[in-house]
Image (tube, rainbow, N blue to C red):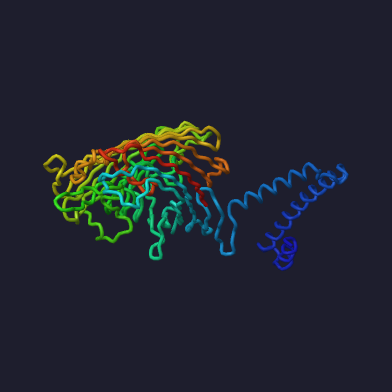
Amino acid sequence: MNAAIALALAMTAQPGSDELKQALEQIEALRVQNERLATKVEGLERRVAEDEGAWITEERAAEIRAIVADVLADGATRTSLAADGATSGWDKSKGFFLASADGAFSLSIKGDAQIRWAYDSRDIGGADAASGSPSSSTSPDADGFEIRRSRLTFAGNIVDSSWTYSVQALFNRAASSSSNTSLNDAYIEKALGGGFTLRAGQFKAPFLREELVSTVNQLAVERSSVNEVFSVSRSQGVRFGWSDETMRFEAFYGDALRANATGPYALSGANAVALNAGASQGVPTGANTSFAQVPTDYAFAGRFEFKPSGDWKQFRDMQSFRGESAGMLFGLAAYAERVDASVDGPAPESLWSVTGDATFDFGGANVLAYAVYRSVSLSEAAAVRGGGTDDSLEQWGAVVQGGLFVADDVEIFARYELGDTDTDRYRTNAESLAANGDELSVATAGFNWWPAGSANRMLKFTLDFGYAFDPLVDFSSSGAQQLVDYTAEGGATSDGQWLLRSQLQFQF
């Protein structure tokens, strides 16, 4: 075809013209190229003749088929090109995803659910307890099934890869016709370069490490009671972050930070029943609220982490699987807030808290230890046992836990936690109760099993047993299947509360 074009140019060009010269040069180049091709064809014909027509042997054919199969399999697991240019597929970290051809827009869809069965046994005494006397229908034992969590997460990037977002919906355990879902996360984040990021919306404020690790990556069936009382959970605001290979820092400013077991106060005649029983009582979180619903003068939180070894990704869970690299992570965090005490009588007004934690991964075993302290100032002084008044609380907690893989897909673990909310002295109406409703001493042990193997962590079964040496009052948590303890005559329980839990967890 090229030769014909060149010949046509040669015939139409004027003698001595530039067009004729160019056409002759093209003809000469084509002649040289044809001679080279003829030489190659001659060589191939000679090779076929020498191999008697069998130059593609069975061995070579098998190799070619294997290569083609590998390429097709790899392509099927990665992406498929749709007619509109969008890519789609499934990935361990992203879940199911869609993306534009240029990567400027993407959407990943992930979900998880926790199916739980629990049996709890506690004492029911006749004396007034910190949480009040039991009714005639109160049972000392309880067991049953529960969907502890069921969530859907939508995440990705918009405009370009530097703008990322996440929206997570939680389906309530106690769903009703008027309330079936709630919003966990809804934020957008901008990567500013140099390791700096800026986030705005609703998300977990940076504080306790145990809370910052996802529920699907915990060691036991549920987080510790210390975490339930002292974690600030989710709120609405902005977060500024920075990280490099060994250090990272996060600073938060926003609405109220949750502070369980700090109030509110209920007045009953001349006796003030301070800090009603149960970890859910206290300063509510600023999540899913209007701007004026939980008035806050200020709420700040910050967390610093140092990682001398390992990589950041391995600390997203509470496990250290066999074959993973060893690593160490140290964290320090603090928060301070001042809220509007909008109830009659003494109420939490200003709070500050500090925590420190250390995590060690050994490639088949792990240890986490942390302690937390919180100071609470009340809006006005309240009566205390023995006479007089006070206007503050000094609260603390500590947790140590560890796991050991006895097989590639089986991990045994143990945890011990203790703490004190400093609330019993304010319970002036519970005269027959010894100062015991504000203390925590719980031991938990169990195992994790990945039925599809530790390489595929989308399925996980956990069984654990916990024993509370002190009555669970301030530290009781329905989310952990813990019931509020009552006291026997004399103000002390004859037996500690014990709890058996099993959970099947799946992700997609």
Q: Is residue 167 above or below residue 40?
A: below
For residue 316, say whether it is visible.
Answer: no
Q: Between residues 311 and 447, which one lies in front from this camera angle?
A: 447
Q: Is residue 471 left or right of residue 466?
A: left
Q: Is residue 157 left or right of residue 68?
A: left
In x, y percent, where is residue 129?
Answer: 26, 45
Q: Between residues 124 and 19, which one lies in front from this camera angle?
A: 124
In x, y percent, where is residue 179?
Answer: 38, 62
Please tell me in which quadrant of the rendered image residue 491 appears: top left
In x, y percent, where is residue 39?
Answer: 80, 47
For residue 295, say whether it is visible.
Answer: yes
Indicate the quadrant containing the N terminus: top left, top right, bottom left or bottom right.
bottom right
Q: Between residues 488 and 444, which one lies in front from this camera angle?
A: 488
Q: Between residues 156 and 339, which one lies in front from this camera angle?
A: 339
Q: Is residue 30 left or right of residue 253?
A: right
* Residue extending furthest toward the left: 388
- Residue, x 38% and y 35% (percent of image)? 443
In x, y percent, where is residue 155?
Answer: 45, 55
